[in-house]
Amino acid sequence: MLEESRMRCRRPVPALLRIALPLLAAGALLADAVGYSAIVDLREQTDLVVAEHHHDWSRATQDARWKMISTTKDPFTQENTYSYLRLLDRASGREIFKKPVPALTHLWISPDSRFVVGLSNVKLWNPYQIVVFDRSGRRVFEKSITSASWPGVQESVTNAVVWYKEPTPAIRLVESQGSVTLSVEDRLGTPRQFRLRASE
């Protein structure tokens, strides 16, 4: 009798819950315990040039970063005092350019030292995850990378965009008939291509 009563009390789990619960559990794996607040310095060099990047995402720069992300969403203005990319002549140490940029997490310089590529896995208050400058300091490419616009990208709730192969993706530039195509290895090992604006 007791067993019969137990059997009557069992109810099937609704189909919606059977689908939703695993999805909620998977999403929790990419939850952020705290907001991104790193201070980062990167350096890359060739025989001819040295590229340096600094960004400060600490509480000290919070007001300036909030102003940018809540209004223009443009980190390339002189109001950006918290993140820069600098290129130096390696032999003399002379500064070739210093530009405000988004927070970057990987630098690459083309073998001929004509282009500097900055990649980023930072999502928090960081509107672009890839930027490219030519040697004169002209910005020739920038792109926001999100899971909504690019299959295979993983995002945490607020902090990270996991899109390129870490720690060191394969990167190359191919010039053909006056155009330049950048190839970056994504997190699954697939080359992703970007067409750059013509460099002067």
Image (cartoon, helix red, strand yellow):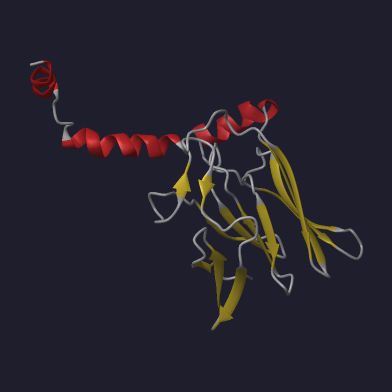
Q: Is residue 6 left or right of residue 128?
A: left
Q: Position of residue 94 (x, y in %)?
A: 87, 58
**Closer to the camera, 23 or 89?**
23
> Left or right: 141 with respect to 88?
left
Residue 65 sits above or below residue 183 on the image: above
Relative to 85, residue 61 above or below? above
Q: Residue at x 66, y 26 (%)?
A: 59
Quick one: which residue is furthest to the bottom in this view?
177
Residue drawn 72% across the image and 65% down it: 135
Q: Is residue 46 above or below residue 25?
A: below
Furthest residue toward front = 1
Residue beneath the point at 47% across and 44% down = 155
Where in the figure is residue 124, as x and y percent of width and height?
A: 54, 37
Which of the two residues, 16 or 163, is positioned nearer the viewer here?
16
Q: Is 29 positioned to the left or the right of 51 in the image?
A: left
Q: Nearer the viewer, residue 200 or 90?
A: 90
Residue 48 place in picture, x, y as percent: 83, 69
- From the viewer's side, name the closer residue of 18 and 147: 18
Picture quarter with the C terminus: bottom right
Q: Quadrant of residue 61?
A: top right
59 left or right of 2? right
Q: Residue at x 12, y 15 (%)?
A: 2
Pick the quarter of the image with the N terminus. top left
Image quadrant in which you'd find residue 5: top left
User: Total label count?
Assistant: 0
